Image (cartoon, helix red, strand yellow):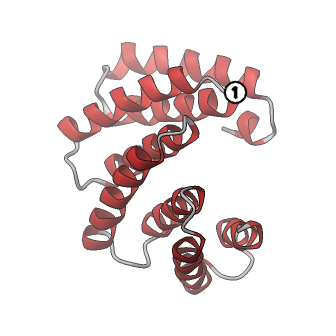
């Protein structure tokens, strides 16, 4: 993940593929640790532009999370939102919005309105709505997300600053 954050996507992918292989052998294919590594690899694939590969891994991870952890587990909700982001990038805005609205509803009910995961999904949904042309709705959601991030994480937290940046780009 550090290599990914530093922009070394090739190096990150190589290590994540090794980690996924090892986790599958040691812990099994549906162990929550394995599924986390799978989602991390899928995010790197997404960042590299391999949206088909990312989507395939994310769909597999989501299915496994739902079976192993249930529909209300934070890892399942993160996987649902992440899949929505990949689907959005592929151009399926309706499909992405549906997944993100589902994730947001469950996050709010299970984790609470101000949980960082709920705020992340709120921001993702706002981006999707903005891409659909609903700039007013997107702005409203981003303002809610910004208020929550400021309250929970503070003014200078990277996630708060990301939402500020999204608002300036809207």
User: Which residue is located at x 57 percent, y 35 percent?
Assistant: 43
Identify the image quadrant of residue 36.
Answer: top left
Along the line of sight, which residue is nearer the eye, 24 or 55? 55
Give the vertical position of 15 relative to 63 (above or below).
above
Viewer-proximal residue, 93 or 17?
93
- Image quadrant holding the C terminus, namely bottom right
How far from the left and from the top, in percent, is residue 73?
Answer: 27, 53
At x 69%, y 27%, the residue is 48
Q: Nearer the viewer, residue 150 or 169?
A: 169
In the rendered image, residue 105, in percent from the top left (x then y), is placed at 29, 66
Residue displayed at 34% across by 26% down = 60
Looking at the picture, how far across and down is residue 132, in whole percent?
53, 57
Element carrying mark 1? helix
Coordinates of residue 74 in the picture (x, y in percent)? 34, 55
Question: How packed is label 1: few (under 14 Cα within 10 Å), some, or many (20 or more)?
Answer: few
| 129, above or below 10, in the image | below
- Quadrant housing the N terminus: top right
Query: Which residue is at 67% across, 27% downward?
Result: 49
Q: Is residue 92 left or right of residue 76?
A: right
């Amino acid at each position: 993940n550090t290599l990914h954050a530093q922009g070394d996507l090739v190096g990150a992918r190589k290590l994540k593929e090794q980690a996924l292989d090892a986790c599958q052998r040691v812990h099994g294919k549906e162990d929550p640790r394995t599924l986390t590594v799978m989602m991390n690899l899928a995010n790197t694939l997404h960042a590299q532009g391999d949206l088909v590969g990312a989507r395939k891994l994310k769909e597999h991870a989501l299915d496994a999370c739902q079976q192993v952890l249930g529909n209300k587990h934070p890892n399942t909700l993160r996987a649902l939102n992440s899949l929505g982001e990949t689907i959005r990038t592929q151009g399926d805005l309706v499909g992405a919005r549906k997944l993100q609205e589902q994730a947001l509803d469950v996050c709010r009910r299970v984790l609470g309105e101000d949980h960082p995961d709920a705020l992340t999904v709120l921001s993702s949904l706002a981006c999707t709505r903005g891409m659909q042309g609903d700039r007013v709705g997107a702005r409203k959601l981003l303002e809610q997300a910004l208020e929550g991030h400021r309250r929970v994480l503070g003014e200078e937290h990277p996630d708060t600053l990301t939402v500020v940046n999204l608002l300036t780009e809207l």
